[in-house]
Image (spheres, rainbow, N blue to C red):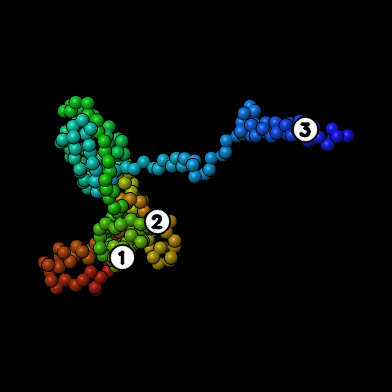
């Protein structure tokens, strides 16, 4: 009966419990052959996604370029692209560059300068992008270039140029669109239905478009009379006074 009350009889039980506790602790630390999975990386530690490549930029008139020669730094130049689309470089002379990408121009300059430079390596950097413009001419009050805004229509461009003159032939406004080859494609736009009847415009302008507003046949005759005839015959009545002209 005393053995049941002896404290030493309960020590093996404590030892087993302690051993089990140690094993559990070691297993939690990875010493039992089953390592705990690493924590998932937080969103802040993940690398940012790579940006999608944008559209390739093509050189336009009015841009400014740095043309650098890696092994001939004395040839480095900063040049503007002239209105005719050309630049001039010491080792190559005149080059037509409008519509080219910087990479295409690098290859062209390297090829053209290979006769004068040894193993030319060229880098082209567009340092300034020209304002995007359209040209409005003909029978408007202020012919000239207009800054192109996103979604601009021919009528908006004409209004930026002071509006139509009375001599404008609204039914046959010409829209000239340049191609990469330097050629222009032409389309006729009926602005009379837009101005007189409120028909929505479906045409949107693009960089370097030309909006040309022609004159009516009557206005052409007025110009001829005023410039060439009236000076010779001052008493001649104005066109349309006393007689009529058929179109």
Label at residue 163: 1
Residue 153 visible in image = yes
Residue 91 horizontal/vertical position (percent) = 16, 33
For label 3, the crowd category at 10 Å Cα-Cα, with few meaning under 14, some 14 to 19 and many 20 or more, is few
Q: Is residue 74 above or below residue 154?
A: above
Q: Secondary structure at mark 1?
A: loop
Q: In this view of the protein, which residue sits in the foreground, 37 or 171?
A: 37
Seen at 28% across and 43% down, the residue is 126
Marks 3/2: CA distance? Answer: 95 Å
- Is tag 3's residue or tag 1's residue first in the polypeptide sequence? 3
Residue 158 horizontal/vertical position (percent) = 32, 61
Q: Nearer the viewer, mark 1 or mark 2?
A: 2
Identity of the residue furthest to the left in this view:
232
Residue 181 visible in image = no
Evaluate if marks 1 and 2 touch, with contact meaning CB atoms under 8 Å apart: no
Q: Nearer the viewer, mark 3 or mark 2?
A: 3
Q: Give the residue number, with chain letter if any, for mark 3.
A: 8
Marks 3/1: CA distance? Answer: 112 Å
Q: Give the residue number, with chain letter if any, for mark 2.
A: 151
Q: In this view of the protein, which residue sits in the foreground, 124 or 212?
A: 124
Q: State which quadrant residue 75 falls in.
A: top left
- Is tag 1's residue or tag 2's residue first in the polypeptide sequence? 2
């Amino acid at each position: 009966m005393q053995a049941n009350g002896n404290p030493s009889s309960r020590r093996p039980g404590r030892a087993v419990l302690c051993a089990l506790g140690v094993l559990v602790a070691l297993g939690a630390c990875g010493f039992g052959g089953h390592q705990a999975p690493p924590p998932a990386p937080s969103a802040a530690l993940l690398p940012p996604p790579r940006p999608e490549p944008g559209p390739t930029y093509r050189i336009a008139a009015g841009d400014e370029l740095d043309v650098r020669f890696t092994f001939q730094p004395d040839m480095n130049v900063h040049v503007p692209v002239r209105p005719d689309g050309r630049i001039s470089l010491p080792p190559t002379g005149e080059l037509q560059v409008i519509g080219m990408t910087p990479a295409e121009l690098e290859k062209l300059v390297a090829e053209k300068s290979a006769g004068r430079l040894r193993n030319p390596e060229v880098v082209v950097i567009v340092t300034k992008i020209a304002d995007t413009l359209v040209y409005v001419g003909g029978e408007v009050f202020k012919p000239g270039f207009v800054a192109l805004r996103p979604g601009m229509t021919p009528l908006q461009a004409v209004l930026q140029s002071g509006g139509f003159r009375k001599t404008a032939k609204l039914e046959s406004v010409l829209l000239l669109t340049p191609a990469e080859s330097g050629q222009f494609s032409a389309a006729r736009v009926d602005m009379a239905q837009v101005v007189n009847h409120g028909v929505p415009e479906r045409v949107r302008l693009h960089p370097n478009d030309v909006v040309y507003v022609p004159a009516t046949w009557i206005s052409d005759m007025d110009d001829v009379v005023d410039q060439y005839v009236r000076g010779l015959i001052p008493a001649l009545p104005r066109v349309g006074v006393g007689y009529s002209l058929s179109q």
